[in-house]
Each structure stands twice: as structure tokens, then as C-alpha cells.
Image (tube, helix red, strand yellow):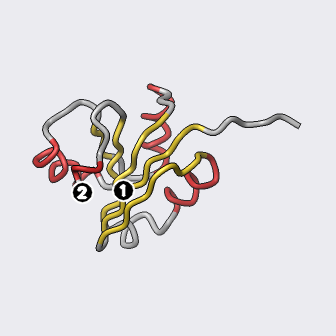
Amino acid sequence: VVNLLPQNEIIFINKASAEKNIKYYYGDKDNIIGVNNISELLFSYVSSKPKRFSVVYAFDKYSDKGEMRNYLKENFEIIEEHKFYNVDVVRYETQIVKSS
């Protein structure tokens, strides 16, 4: 999984508890942010406003119940997605919102 993570982009981990596991293999870098819900993710996102970012969903069917995935799918463009057993890596890009 860590081989799929970009080196120079923000990486959100859907469970703050899984952050330690990713940092163990990826390295203890500042671009990895553990979040427990969509509110925490959005707060961190607004602070940095990256054009692209990744989310590692680890066992999210037991905790988030799809709230984070659904919000991000509606508001950002998925540019890359990798699925594993109970862990998914999804890379998003900011969408251009057209005004009507």
C-alpha cells in the first residue's frame, strides 16, 4: 500500500489509529494526517488547500459508514483508486465548480 502513496502530497488516513501503521512503513513524514471523520479531514484540507491528496481508507466499513467516501466522491474528482482487502487508497483532485 505505501508504494502507492505520493511523496509530495497530503495523505489522509481515515482512522487516526491507523496513522502509526502507515508511518511505520512510509516514514514519519509531515504529509500524513490521521483523521477520524469528515469534519477533521475538511478542517485539515481547508488549512492547506492542496490541489491533489490521497485518502487511505482502512477498515472504514466499521467506523465511517461511507460518510467520508460519499462526501469526497461528490465534491472531488477521483483520479486514481486501488482496492485491497479492507484497505483502499484513493487519490483525489479538486474539481472546478461551475457557477450557473
Determine the residue positioned at 47% across, 69% down: 65
Measured from the top left, where is residue 16 in percent x and y? 27, 50
Q: Position of residue 55 (x, y in %)?
A: 39, 50
- First of labels 2, 1 by sequence position: 2
Q: Is residue 5 above or below residue 28?
A: below
45 above or below 81? above
Q: Nearer the viewer, residue 28 or 42?
A: 28
Residue ranking furthest to the left: 24
- Looking at the image, residue 27 sits to the left or right of residue 85; the answer is left
User: In the image, what residue occupies the spot 44% across and 43% down?
Assistant: 41
Name the residue nearer the viewer: 57 or 79.
79
* 57 is higher (above) or lower (below) than 29: below
- Could you say whether the residue bearing mark 1 is in a helix, strand or loop? strand
Element marked by disc 2: loop
Please identify the quadrant where the C terminus is shown.
Answer: top right
Where is residue 71? Give x, y as percent.
58, 54
Give how far apart the Cα atoms at labels 2 and 1 are. 7 Å
- Contact? badges 2 and 1 (CB < 8 Å): yes
Taking the image as shown, residue 41 lies to the left or right of residue 100, namely: left
- Residue beneath disc 2: 1
**Tally of numbered discs:** 2
Q: Which residue is mark 1?
A: 89
The residue sitting at 16% across, 49% down in the picture is 20
Left or right for 77, reference 33: right
